[in-house]
Amino acid sequence: QVIEFELLISDRRPLQDLEQVFEDMKQRRVIKVAIHPHR
């Protein structure tokens, strides 16, 4: 899993872009929905 993750970063997106994606997910609260599905 770690190797695939590193390959994804180095092959497709730079680290900063990946951080932007994570922040975007936080803003959309996708993580919270995935962790605590109430609906």
Image (cartoon, helix red, strand yellow):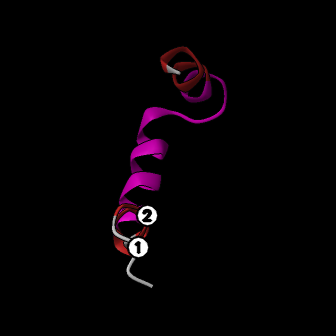
**Prevailing secondary structure class for the magenta stretch in the rendered image:** helix
Circle 2 is placed at which residue position?
34
Question: Is 32 situated above or below 16?
Answer: below
**For residue 10, what is the image quadrant?**
top right
Q: CA distance from mark 2 to mark 1?
A: 6 Å
Position of residue 4 in the picture relative to residue 28 (left or right): right
Circle 1 is placed at which residue position?
37
Question: Residue 14: percent from the left, percent from the top?
Answer: 51, 33
**For residue 4, what is the image quadrant?**
top right
Q: Secondary structure at mark 1?
A: loop
Q: What residue span does the magenta drawing correspond to?
A: 8-26
Q: Amino acid at mark 1?
A: Pro
Q: Nearer the viewer, residue 38 or 16?
A: 38
**For residue 32, what is the image quadrant?**
bottom left
Q: Which residue corresponds to the image point at 40% horizontal and 71% vertical from the top-left? A: 33
Position of residue 30 in the picture relative to residue 32 (left or right): right
Q: Which of the image's four quarters has the C terminus? A: bottom left
Q: Amino acid at mark 2?
A: Ala
